[in-house]
Amino acid sequence: MAGSTNNTKSNGKTGGTGKEQSSTTRKETVTKAAPVIKSEGRVGSFRTLAERIASGEQIVPPRQLSGLDRRNHVRSTLREDHQTRIEERSAGARDKFKKLAGSRFSFFRGTALLFYRDMVGSDAHMPTVLALGDVHPENFGVMPNKEGVPIFSVNDFDEAVYAPFTWDIKRGAVGFWVGAQEEGDLSRKQRRKIIRHFVNGYLDAMTDFAENETEKKDAFQRNNSPKVIKRLFDEAWEERKDWLWSDYLEPTGRGFRADDELEPVSSQKEKFQKAIDKLAKDNGIDVTHRVGELKVKDVCIRHGQGTASLGLPRYYVLLEGPSKNATDDIIIEFKRARTSALEGLTPPTEFNAGTEADRIAHGQAVQLAHGDVFYGAIEIEGTSFMTRERAPFRDDIDLDELSKKTWRKYAYVCGQALAQAHALSDDLGRVDYDVEPSIVSACQPRELFIEDILRFTVETADRLKTDHIDFIEDFKTGAFDSIDFVYR
C-alpha cells in the first residue's frame, strides 16, 4: 500500500480511539521531494464522526465501505491499533497477527477497535450503562471474590467504558455466533437459537432486577448456578499447592521457574514491592489471613498470554503466604493498561470511567460486586498497569466441549451475568438514573428487539468473514510489518 515502509517510523500520533499511543509527534524528512509532514491520525475524525452520527446526520460509516476501500480501512485500523508493538518490532506483535490469522474467532476477539469503529456513534437513543466493552463467550468465567471464594461472572474489564447497553449485547451476540460456528461447528439455525438464549437471558434477568433490586446479591456461586456452570466450577477447581508447584514454582519453591512462558526477573522485586504496598493502601487490602505481610518473593515476565493484549508487558508477582512453605503463596498479575477500543466512538455522554488502568479498575469495582480485592490500578515508571489475582480456579469454559443444548444454556447464563453487571451501573457506577426499568422499556416490543439483534449479528459476522480473508492475505504479504505515515 502506498504510504508505508518497512524501515521508516511513523510521524503520526495516535491516542483516544487507538489503543497504543505515541508519546511524541516526530517530524522526519525522507527526501527533499517527499517530505514527511505531521499527521494527526484518524482518531479526531472518528470522534467527530461519532458526534455527527449521534446527532442524526446521514453519514456513511466504515461498516458500509466495500471492496478495496474496506480492505484499506481494516489494514489501517489494525496498523494504528498495534502501532507501538509494530514500531518496537515486538515478537508478540507477530505472534498476535499469526493468532488472528489462525481463526475467525481469534480475529474477532483481537480486533475490538475495528468492530467498534463500525458502530461509531450508533444507538444514541439507548440508555447508558458502564459497558464491559468486550463481551464474548470466553470473557465470562470463574474467578475469586473479595474473600477468595470462586464466583462466575464477567471477567475482563480492559475495554470498560460508559456506552449504550446495546453495544455489549451486540458484541456478545456476534461473539457467540462466531464462537459457536468455529468452536461448536453449529448451523446458522442453531446459532440463531443461541443468540436468542443470550438476549433472553439478559432481558429476563434485567426484568427481575427492575422488579426486585437484587443485583448486588445475586452473584453466581456453585450452590446457586445451573448445571452448565456447576460443571465449570468443578473443572476449574485445583488445590493451590498443586497449582503453584505444577505451573509456576522452581524446585526449591523460592521463586518462579524459567521456561517458555515465565521469565524470572528477581532483580525487580523491590520495585514491585513498592507497587504492592501502594496497591494495598489504595484498595484498603486487609487479607493477612491469606498473604501475611504482603511480601514479594519473586517477579517474572509472562509471555504469550491473552489475545487482544498479546505482546504487551505482563508481570506475575509472587506473594509469600502465611505458612511460608510455598503451599499458599498468591500470584498478582500486572498487565499494561490500554486505552479502551470504545474511546471516542460512543455517542457523547456525560459519564466518564477515567483513563487507562483507573478506568479498568472502575469497571471491575462496579461490574463485579464483591470481587477480587487485588483488582486495581498502579503506575510503574510512568506506565499504567491494571492488577488482579491469579487463582487456581480462575478459568473460562472450553467452548469445544459444549453440546448444542449446553451452548444455549451457557449463552442464557452469560446473558444473565451481563445484565447483572449493567444493573450495577446506577448502584456502584456513575449513572444517575434508574437503569433497569429504562432498559426493559427500551427493549419493547421484545420480539422486535431480539430480531434486530439477530439481523445485526448476521450482517456483522458476514462482514467479519470478508475482513478476515483480506487480513490473512495482507498479513502474508507483509502489510503489518510497518505502520501508516504521511509523506505529503
Image (cartoon, rainbow, N blue to C red):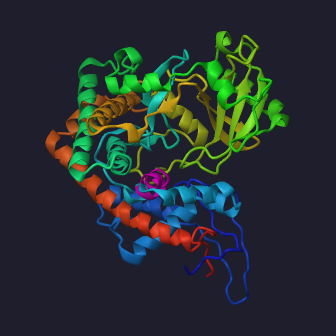
Task: Give the residue at x 30% y 63%.
Answer: 57
Residue 445 visible to the viewer: no
**Relative to the observer, which residue lies in front, 429 or 309?**
309
Q: Of all residues shown, which one is farthest toward the bottom?
A: 33
Residue 403 placement, left or right of 449: right
Horizontally, residue 432 falls left or right of residue 9, namely: left
Give the x, y percent position of residue 345: 43, 54
Report the predominant secondary structure element of the magenta stretch. helix
Give above or below for 198 relative to 150: below
Residue furthest right in the image: 267
Name which quarter of the figure residue 135 lies in: top left
Inspect the magenta stretch and tell me whether residue 141 lies in it.
no
Q: Please identify the quadrant where the N terminus is shown.
A: bottom right
User: Which quadrant, please, contains the C terminus?
Assistant: bottom right
Q: Residue at x 45, y 56 (%)?
A: 103
Displayed quadrant of residue 58? bottom left
**Above or below: residue 370 compared with residue 264:** above
Q: Is residue 355 visible?
A: yes
For the point 49% across and 71% down, the residue is 473
- x then y, percent, for residue 89: 70, 62
Q: Position of residue 43 (x, y in %)?
A: 52, 61
In this picture, which residue range is highlighted in magenta? 105-115
Residue 310 locus on image (x, y percent):
60, 49
Relative horizontal placement of residue 357, taking residue 346 as reference (left or right): right
Q: Is residue 454 above or below residue 237?
A: below
